Image (cartoon, grey):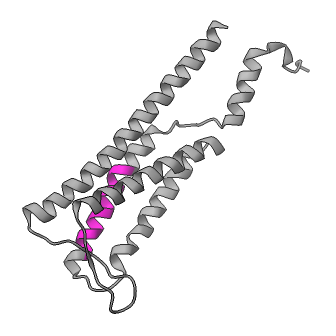
Amino acid sequence: MDAMKMTTVAGQSDVGRRRRARFLAVAAVVAAALGLWAVYHLAFGIDLRSPASFGEHGITSAVGPGNAAFVSALAALAAWGLLAVLERLTSRARRVWLAIALLALALSLGGPLSGTGLTAADRMELLGFHLLVGAVLIPLMYRTAPVVATSVKRRREQLARTEHPDTREPAA
């Protein structure tokens, strides 16, 4: 019984460490985005704009620190949520998540490249935001995932086997 308690406590501490690491990854992503916004706006005096998306006569909008923080936090939390769901569904969550994260980053680059009303410099700056957030988020979140995750169902089966050793099938 003591071994089971130690496993449970160790499992909880692993979950706690993973949760803290993921929270810090979200914070690092937001800090990186805000840092880049500060460099663009405060150091270089760039008025960063996002593209007009609705028709030829759409209006571009300013990208402020609130926008940078909100969007980067949203992306990081979505990445965390997807990784958590994948860890419950598959033992290869880390690999699957990495493939999806890289695809999402590639697709997100279409945002700054599409729309109207932006200068080439604005497009490059927005691409910089996307790439920086991806460069911070993907490795930090990837490191928090176990190399081989066990699904909830598999963990229950393993726990049941350790609690009732008599239920194992006899060797042939």
Q: To which quarter of the image does residue 132 belong?
A: bottom left
* In the image, residue 24 above or below residue 168: below
Given the current orientation, which residue lies at the most extreme top position? 2
Residue 128 lies in the magenta-colored region: yes
- Rendered location of residue 92, percent (x, y): 60, 44
* In the image, residue 135 above or below residue 158: below
Most prominent secondary structure in the magenta stretch?
helix
- Rendered location of residue 94, percent (x, y): 53, 45
Which quadrant, please, contains the N terminus? top right
Which quadrant, please, contains the C terminus? top right
Q: To which quarter of the image does residue 48 belong?
A: bottom left
Q: To which quarter of the image does residue 42 belong?
A: bottom left
Left or right: residue 139 compared with residue 156: left
Most foreground residue, 77 or 171: 77
Given the current orientation, which residue lies at the most extreme right position? 172
- Rendered location of residue 122, percent (x, y): 22, 75
Most foreground residue, 54 or 106: 54
* In the image, residue 102 above or below residue 111: above
Q: Is residue 90 visible?
A: no
Give me the residue at 53% from left, 19% from top.
10
Magenta stretch in the rendered image: 123-137
Left or right: residue 155 compared with residue 71: right
* In the image, residue 115 above or below residue 66: below
